[in-house]
Amino acid sequence: MRHALPTFMLLCSCLVATGCGRTPPAYFRPNMVEATKQRLTPDQEQQVATVLLAMFGTPDEPVCLPETGLDEAKLRLAAGPVRSDIVGRKNGLYREHCAHCHGVTGDALGPTAAFLNPYPRDYRPGVFKFKSTERADKPTHADLVRLLHNGVPGTSMPSFALLPPAQVEALVEYVKYLSMRGETELALMRAFFELDDDAGGKLPETREFLVDETLTPVAEKWKAAADAQIQVPPMPADIDLVASIAKGKELFYGDKANCVKCHGVTGLGDGQANDYDDWNKAIVEVRKELSSSAEQARGASTSGMSPEELSEHRVQLAWLDKFGKVLDGDALEPRTIPPRNLRHGIYRGGRRPLDLYYRIHAGINGAPMPAAKGTVPPEDIWHIVNYIRSLPYELDGELGADKPMLARDRF
Amino acid sequence: MNRLSGIFWSLLFLAVPVLGVATFAIAPAIDVWLPKDVSTHGAAIDGLFYFILVLTGVVFVATEVMLFWFLWKYDAAKAAGPATYIHGSHALEVVWTIIPAATLLFLAIYQMNTWADVKMRRPSMAPSVEVVARQFEWRLRYPGRDGTLGTADDLFLVNDLHVPLDEDFLVQLKSMDVLHSFFLPNLRIKQDAVPGMKIPVWFKAKEAGQYDIVCAELCGWGHYKMKGRVTVESREDFDRWLESQYARQEATQPEADPSRSVAITE
Amino acid sequence: MSIASSPSTVHHEAVAQAPAPHPAGFLSTYVFSKDHKVIGLQFLFSTLVWFLIGGLLALAVRWQIAWPWSDVPVLGKLFAQEGGQMAPEFYTMLFTMHATVMIFLVIIPILAGAFGNFLIPLMIGADDMAFPTLNMLSYWFMWPAFIAFGASFFVEGGAASSGWTSYPTLSTNVASSPGSGWGQTLWLLGLTMVGVSSMLGSVNYMTTIILMRAPGMTMFRLPMTIWAMFITAVLQAFALPVLTAAGFMQLADRTLGTGFFSPEGNIVNNWMQATGGGQPLLWQHLFWFYSHPAVYIMILPAMGMVSDILTTFARKPLFGYRPMVYSIAGIAGLGFIVWGHHMFISGMNPALGITFMVSTMMIALPSAVKTFNWLGTIWGGRIQFTTAMLFALSFVSMFIIGGLSGIFMAATPVDIFIHDTYFIVAHFHYVLFAGTAMGVFAGIYYWFPKMFGRTMNEFWGKVHFFLTFLFMNGTFFTMHILGAVGFPRRLADAYHYETFHHLQPLNAFMTWCAIGMVATQIIFAANFFWSMFFGPVAGRNPWHSNTLEWTAPSPPGHGNFDFQPVVHRGPYEYSVPGVEKDHLMQTDPPNAAAAALAAAH
């Protein structure tokens, strides 16, 4: 009885101590939306995961084949858990600065992602909006560095201007790495569809198929970006700013550029506003398709089915069920993308005249904004740029007294 | 045995003032102390801090030592006879009411001037910069060549505040979304940014260098990463910097060397 | 002062005519009991459970501060994909809920709810509260709050994460942070329910103390605990309606589209909540108009309990009974005009800041008077180092630190630098943990025999005290110097700032201390439950104390007293010269004392 109380205390402490323990290391999440869409079997999903592991490693131990052209030393600086190495250099930069939103996998499914408006970028399709290259091309290295430096004003993407340049370099390299990994994953998952019947539902595990046919094309696009920069003509020198703005305005409302369609007659972004960007559109379309096939499948009468048809029908129902669950877990509620309000003076892709030129010339990849290239002559794009830049300061014009004014500007 | 426990507990209470004073004595030596002050008004604030530190330190040590001494001396195991039967002392109550009251009142009056200097006597000048806090960054807007905010030649920057040395600097502080707080530890400045309000903040930096801008009011999940930097530099460097940033903002052609397209001011 | 000067026998008889019927059945005895002692214990157990939860939340917070973005034990499993690294919004949720739980579910209900309920009728010599049904409801209104706060952890976006101060527009705009969705709405509902509970309690306490005192128990014969509870109840009654109203306004802003606290055109995260036209500072004024008096609601009862315990174990009358009462009243009065000191740098007119600075300086005065009187009480005493006494002494010792550090913040220019840094965190933890929580521990060790009829183990009690005292100062004292560097509170990771990056080792030390502090409470929990069933049986008055509760059986039965207590003197007649025993209970007949005195001559 004398030692009963201390024994009781020890017992309590043991109870508390159990349940502690390390969490297993971070992992890359498979692209379940695509895998389910392609109706991959668990074995096939496993094969993709194994191939990706060999090609790209894990979030803690990234590897890269020479074909990617990536710098593994930089990747190592960005990868892994947040820590300082023996010389006191910061490691795990991606998980310190980016993973909360963009996710460890770069799938824009980080814990914070669902609460951001707009959602963070999903790197896996390899599509980037703000760059100095043509619409379908990848951004250059400098484009990504600039984006990290400026952030994306008007979104939750902050500026990383104060990070040391070496850290920014490492992060850009890591974003490219995640994007290549994501694109390779997509390519592999889609490759099952084109398999011959005698392949046994397995991808060939040859270097020729995996590296030369799958990885290299992805990497080449990134390497080609540097040479795909848009050639910008000098701003027309023979016209003064007021005239240029007037000309730009004409073009803005004109048929060819037709900016007014989405950005609205007021420039407030109140034109057509019910469109989606590519990332959200993909989910919207999958959902639409899914609900129509679900209707079809559930509406079908099973009475007249042969046993084969019946089992196929069951497989279809199970697949629909699974897809529904995957979408709930691995896709965010789609949101429309409103056209930009041009009178705020907030420019997501940068406020330099040059940036606006790029946007109008090449459009915005992944977004409804079309390219003016080919429809509007390069000099005229400069006039539109000048007009756009004058909009936040335009005091007269048709708007007159209707111009909305924020409360904070009145105090 | 009983007496030993009395000794032990009274010494434990003596450890409070001893270790308390020791902590504050060691802190500056291990650099866990007020960061370097580079503002002209900071000396007054730090002076007040030290003044209150000494004042409260004396009271702290006196009362805690008294507590120890009473515990030591009036331990039931040591002191013989019954406790002193007393219900209080009118004179003592008056003394220990009036002395602290006078001290506190003095302190209240003594500090008013510093407060007025930092928060009430605004220099008569146009804002040098507009700082707009936003989740989770500091968006800056310099008035440009015409010295007026809200015109087409404004210079837009983010997180990277530059300030000329030895000049009055007036910040117009706003918030775009939620509460933030503009905290410059080295300049002894802190002011909440409130949506719907324009709040003036002013200071004069007296030493060149780079210092942190911290957000000191909870502004959401990314509050910790709302970091800015203030660079204090000579007027010439400041003007040169403004010009170069403005030229960069108005660029119509990509910069020759792509790696230079990033403004790395280090 | 008519109440104070006239004996309240008349009132007492008027109210206590109908004796409360004895409860029958398990439910009405232990669950929906109207007996103040059972309700007090219900409050005690519920709040101790939340105390544990709040403490664990604090540990998770401290883990992140010491080792940001590392794998968190246990909680890391929630972030398996990130390798156990907690998300930043999760951290904001943790500290918001740590404060919310500790303030609204632990400190306020354990002081007023647990001790207030258990002690008030016993110490004034009444058989129960004035309104037993209201009393029961005041406990059961806590349950919607428990459920709302508890459930909010599991809704989308997690529990509230805009700080326990819930400043708009972070809290009013549903898109401004993950916790600003359902979590914040549940938080506001929970807060309202805590308010209802406190209000029911406060009405009850005031009525009971004014009308149901035993014959001879004048106001100035009340023990300090009761005085503190009484003034706390008055504070609650006057301040709470403001918070409740403000809470409903915020709820309306969030759900009905009003804009009390949002300026026009306020857009957060590309989401416009309301057309606006309001002011974020309005919330701060309303919130602090309640929450500053609430700070005193969270300390005054502990001050009262500590005064009683100090006198008992110093075997000496309280030094300056009336000044002590007046200073509590002074704190309560001044407490209503100092709220602006939370807002010196909020954008409030700086000229107004000066007014609040002066009133804040003045409120330090009654606290100083109380401290000097406590020192006067132990001076010349015969101190018995029981566990309860040690906790009470540490209350005094720590309250000196918490009180003095407040002067730094009251000085407006200094506040510019240390506002929202760890200096303020140190300050309020010294008042609320090193102060109130120590007072609560003292109270538990002291009144445990009355609650359960058995005493707690003294040896393990002292071990508990020693380790808590050590680890507590290791955790909180270092926060002062952290604050001197300007280390801001509420940052998930401050080490990327040049100014603060060298402070990680110090924070790691504090976290180790915090872990030790929480682990130490296992000793307390084990001792508590063990002693409840197996501790040595205590008599009616194990500490040889004077106040009325010690004349009742331990534990007191239904109706409390087995005789009608009649009060003949104040509560602190210890070591009266000429009296054989060293205490003279409030009920001891006067002729005994007179006879003793006569015999001595």
Image: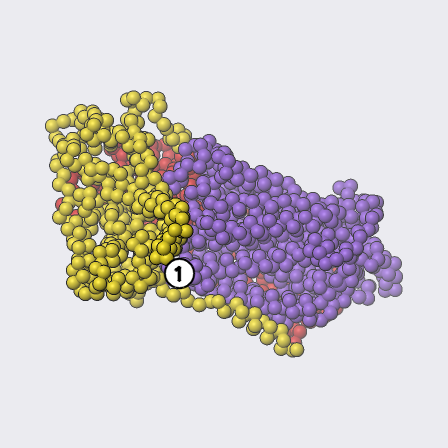
Chain colours: A yellow, B red, C purple
Residue lying at the far bottom of the rendered structure: A2
Residue A79 vs A249, above or below: the answer is below
Horizontal and vertical percent position of residue B184: 38, 47
- Subunit bearing disc 1: C
Mark 1 neighbour class, 10 Å CA radius: few under 14, some 14 to 19, many 20 or more: some
Residue shown at 32% from the left, 34% from the top: A273
The quarter of the picture where residue B2 lies is bottom right
Examine the rendering and report whether any part of residue B25 can be seen.
no
Question: Residue drawn at (82%, 55%), measured in percent from left and top?
Answer: C565
Position of residue C390 in the picture relative to residue A90 (left or right): right
Lateral position of residue A243 relative to residue B100, left or right: left
Q: Residue at x 49, y 39 (%)?
A: C254
SS for dot 1: helix
Q: Position of residue A302 (x, y in %)?
A: 40, 51
The relative height of residue B67 versus residue C487 in the rendered view (above or below) is below
The image shows residue A375, relative to residue C209, as above or below, that is above
Kindly indicate the quadrant of the structure image that contains residue A371: top left
Q: Which residue is mark 1?
A: C80
Q: Name the kind of residue labelled 1 in the image.
A: Ala
